[in-house]
Image (cartoon, rainbow, N blue to C red):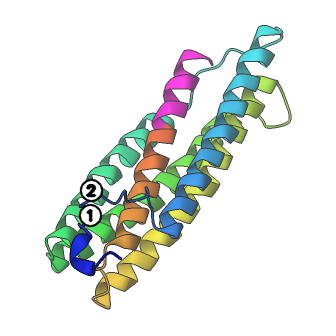
Amino acid sequence: MMMAEDYKLVDTPVEQPLSMHPKKFALWLFIVTVVMIFAAFTSAHIVRQADGDWLIYDLPTMLWYTSAIILLSSVFMQWAYMAAKKDKLEQVKLALAITTVLGILFLVGQVKAWGQLVDNNIYFNGNPAGSFLYVFTFVHALHLVSGVIYLIYMLISSYKYKVHAKNMLNMEMCSTWWHFLGGLWIYLFIFLLLNH
């Protein structure tokens, strides 16, 4: 019969499973879904453009401004994130407020871009070239509205002192979503520059 002292404990490393917070996982699944939607849109654009009967037009100048606005907003979003990690709460509030205002300015700019399209006789119900541009910008704007709503939620949370170094989940998710939306817009803008 073996005694307890006869057993040797062996240090075996316990493998930690790859884990992610369920909310982050859901966000990443949603991001993958959005990427697939826009990949389908851009693929359809290329295929339809190859069929001929494609209107050649200049992109609205407002899209240059909205692209600059979205890039600038990502800088302020990153500032908010870094400030939250360092518990610089006043900076968090300021950076989130600026990011929110820039997000709203982006949306206003998109509406003005649609106005410029109409001024140039490019309508949704016309040539497919214009239709695709409206679809790209409208669907992206819808997603950006969700980002602005998330920013407003985070701004309110920051005033309630719920955004700080020990409570970063929502800040990380908001930052990820906002940077994704900015990157998605830059991709779409470059795609449209090369394929309009």
Which element is circle 1 on? helix
Q: Is residue 147 magenta?
A: no
Q: Amino acid at mark 1?
A: Tyr
Residue 164 visible somewhere in the drawing: no
Q: Which quarter shows the N terminus?
A: bottom left
**What residue is shown with label 2?**
78
Position of 67 compared to 88: left or right? right
**Looking at the picture, how far across and down is residue 55, in whole percent?**
74, 16
Q: Residue at x 49, y 25 (%)?
A: 190
Mark 1 surroundings: few (<14), some (14-19) or many (≥20) residues within 10 A? many
In the displayed structure, 113 sits above or below 51; it is below
Q: Amino acid at mark 2?
A: Gln
Which element is circle 2 on? helix
User: Are the residues tagged 1 and 2 within 8 Å (C-beta)?
Assistant: yes
Give the Cα distance between marks 1 and 2: 5 Å
Residue in the foreground of this view, choosing between 9 and 63: 9
Q: Which quarter shows the C terminus?
A: top right
